Image (spheres, rainbow, N blue to C red):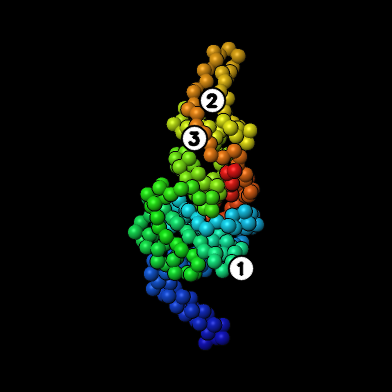
Amino acid sequence: MADNDGFQTVSLKKRNKKRQNKKNLSEEEIITDKLFNKYNTLIQKSLLFKNLVPNLDYVKDVRCIRCLALGSFIEEIQPLYQLSLLIEIVNHLIELNCKDDDYSLVVSLYDPAFTPKDISYINNELNNKKGNITWIYEDEKNWENKESDKNVLYYIPHGDLHLLNYLLPLLKPRFYLGNYIFDHLARVKADDDMAYLNNMKLKHSKNIKNSDSDDFEHIKQHKKKQEPIENIPVEFVDLYFNDIKVYTNFHESIEQGPWLSSFSSLALHEFI
């Protein structure tokens, strides 16, 4: 048998053995392999993460990350990439506080879409990685009764408008990593039943592209020959913040990658 044939045989054996080993992995082991041996590398090399890392200095003092609306990472690929980014954020915060022996971090996750396997993976597999990090599944009841804590980073990769309208006045987050808020507000209409977001749009309309906030306050003229359309009354509510700072800029373009739309419009905000 020719030498090159021999090499081919060995290569095939190794390949088949590797495939066989992967077949023998449990579902949890496959998830762990993707998170810590594949997706983590892709995230670390992404422009998104390179833009985010220096801005994590703004949140280095947080003692808790509350992750919501992630989706089932056991069953779907995009939530798995979003979880991978969360793990990298956690690792970087630990590095930033490596000189503080008392530093610890709680990572709390909730989504009604989580399956029992998701919950088990969070509480068991993720929770065994590092001693100063606690990963825990916590439903909304534990958080609705808590007082607002400024040392919490809220990670909500794809929270819809109704979720934000409910959470912002309830939890009063200071730091929010999620959809670029001004893009969200541009989608809010005056006749939507979302008083909090309506008031945010009114106050911060100067930051919103293609804002139609005129229909909240004034008579709006569409054409000269048309009769004016009366303004729609909006319930007034007090906002818990005066300004919104956005520290990252990767929401301005879409980075192509295997994560598809997992991180589209993602931005790090501070409500001041």
Q: Quadrant of the C terminus?
A: top right
Query: Residue at point 36% right, 61% down?
Result: 117
Vertical relation: 194 (above or below) 52: above
Residue on which the image places disc 3: 196
Q: Earlier in the sequence, mark 2 or mark 3?
A: 3
Vertical relation: 114 (above or below) 238: below
User: Type of residue at label 2?
Assistant: Phe
Residue on which the image places disc 2: 216
Disc 3 residue crowd, few under 14, some 14–19, many 20+, Cα 10 Å: many
**Do the CB atoms of the residues marked 2 and 3 lie less than 8 Å apart?**
no
Question: Residue 173, position in %: x, y?
Answer: 52, 46
Q: Between marks 2 and 3, how big is the CA–CA gap?
A: 13 Å
**Quarter occupied by residue 166:** top left
Query: Residue at point 55% right, 35% down?
Result: 200
**Do the CB atoms of the residues marked 1 and 3 lie less than 8 Å apart?**
no
Question: Residue 72, position in %: x, y?
Answer: 41, 55
Q: Which residue is more in the foreground, 221 or 149?
A: 149
Vertical relation: 87 (above or below) 213: below
Q: Which residue is more in the foreground, 200 or 4?
A: 200
Residue on which the image places disc 1: 99
Which one is closest to the eye, mark 1 or mark 3? 1
Which one is closest to the eye, mark 2 or mark 1? 1
Disc 2 residue crowd, few under 14, some 14–19, many 20+, Cα 10 Å: many
Query: Helix, strand, or loop for circle 2?
Result: helix
Query: Residue at point 39% right, 51% down?
Result: 142
User: Type of residue at label 1?
Assistant: Lys
User: Type of residue at label 3?
Assistant: Tyr
Q: Earlier in the sequence, mark 2 or mark 1?
A: 1
Query: Residue at point 37% right, 49% down?
Result: 141
Q: Between marks 1 and 3, how big is the CA–CA gap?
A: 40 Å
